[in-house]
Amino acid sequence: MKVSLVVVLLFSIGVLLVSAQPPSQPNLYPFTADGFDTVILDDISWANELSFQSFGPPNTTNITFFVYGDSRVRTVYPGPNFYVGQTPNENWHLPFIDFHTFQNGSDIWGIGPVNPIFARDRGAYSGFQFEIAVVTTKVNQYNPRGRIFVEQPLGFEGTFYGVHVVSFDIWNTIGYFVGFFPPNSSAPGVLNFGVRRAHFNTTLFDGNQPYNTSNDAWYFDSAVDDCVVYPNAQLVTYNNDFRPMLLHARNITTNPPAPVNSTYIVVVDPYTNYVTLLRANYDPKVPVTRTGFQYLPVFQNFQVGHVVSAVVWDQLLFVGVAVDGIGTGWIDVLYLANLTRKANSIYLPANYSDPRALVLDFFHPTPTIYIGMNGGRSILKFDIMSLKIVGYQTLPEYLHRTWRGQPTHEHLYFITNEQHSKVYRVNKRDFCPNECMAFGYCSKGQCVCGPNLVMKGNSCQWKEVVHEKEVAKKDQGGEIALGIFFALATVAAGAGWYLVWKNRRGYQSVA
């Protein structure tokens, strides 16, 4: 009995260990169809992040993306030989709420709050306290896994849902975290919603001395690094639709003028539809201060919307607003200096309700934003200077769940958010002034039809040869079906006549 129990326990432990290991990740290569190169992700469903490995425009040779979803990360290699490879490190498989990657020197890092299996219950008033996980390709003898969890001061004293990290030299990495945190230990049950700035010590991975991650990884001074957006706030459990967004901006023209090279963080809160501007310089001695605060109206044309995306260009903030059902969404344009609304918003075509992916193309010679739809049939090209849509690329139905995107010199890369998530790319040359017809797409500025289809008038139709084959198949099928019905009718008629004959014979014999 004891031996059997030991065997069962060992077997159970073995199963748990095997199931805890991340699955192997073979390279995934695209298939080309309907004018697009598409990779189907075999181990990531509901992908929700696609980010650069470094902050700012990288050069042509070192562009790498990371796609994240379902607690898994994969590396996307763009370029002529586009494919999706493995995660940089098998220990990157964590349930991140938000995930931000950056490059420091030659090392790649990923940072974000982790949920839910590493959360700590801190009572009804504050919900769960999320730890901040740091993953990196850099390891040493004291951290061979390239992964640490930070309980203090960020995780244990706050519930942070979003992160933005800037690494501007090998010694200085700044993280900005948005969420809820108590004002001080003497105010139990009180939470503020706001931003915390913290400095991350990347040199922990350089030395040969052990370290205490709780004390040495992140450091901040609440007197200068905490900035309250909403005081005495009620905790809200955010999901992918209502997670606050952090955007980075510099040298915004304010009145009175701000110091040169001032760094700003823009907080876009989909839950309340408020936009907040914070001056949050890299210098730890300069306090983080709120300089702008504005409610974003989300009621237009008898439709109620909610914020789903945002991007910063120069002195402007572009915010994507989605509406329910088959309504029509729009893009709001705000001046960052005072967060006032520009006179005209960008109204999307009819039934384009969910502008989920706003992609700022900083490689383009003229300011351009591309808009990907969660549920729309096209990628829209938008000119920032004229505030007009100037191009369309029509998508096949299997790419209608666009969620996030990133640019390169020649292409736009997008991910879909669905049970079988995909990574696909669009060539920047392939945009037309109007939407292409059904079963068509844009190629070098001209609408073309998909395989085995030809354009007749303004629609894509079967080629004649294919059409004739289809008609022949239908005729042949009809003849076979007619023959079967004829045979069945003959049998039924024979059976009927037999029954009539039998009944009559029986009647005569009785007489």
Image (spheres, rainbow, N blue to C red):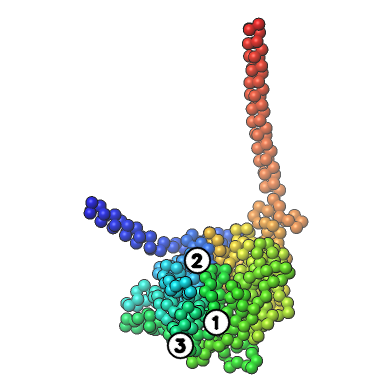
Residue at mark 3: 221
Classify residue 364 as left or right of residue 7. right
Q: Up-down: is 314 above or below 77?
A: below
Q: State the mark number for residue 412.
A: none
Q: Earlier in the sequence, mark 3 or mark 2?
A: 2
Question: Which amino acid, mark 1?
Answer: Pro
Depth check, mark 1 against mark 3: the one in front is: 1
Mark 1: which secondary structure?
Answer: loop
Name the kind of residue labelled 3 in the image: Asp
Question: Is the residue 346 above or below the residue 484 in the image?
Answer: below
Q: Is residue 317 above or below residue 453?
A: below
Tell me residue 73's x, y (percent). Answer: 47, 68
Spatial distance from mark 3 to mark 2, Cα to Cα?
A: 33 Å
Give the distance between the C-alpha atoms of the residues marked 2 and 1, in whole angstroms. Answer: 32 Å
Q: Measuring 61% from the left and 77% from the top, which residue is drawn there?
A: 274
Secondary structure beneath dot 3 equals loop
Q: Which residue is mark 1?
A: 231
Q: Which residue is mark 2?
A: 69
Residue 144, image x, y percentages: 34, 74
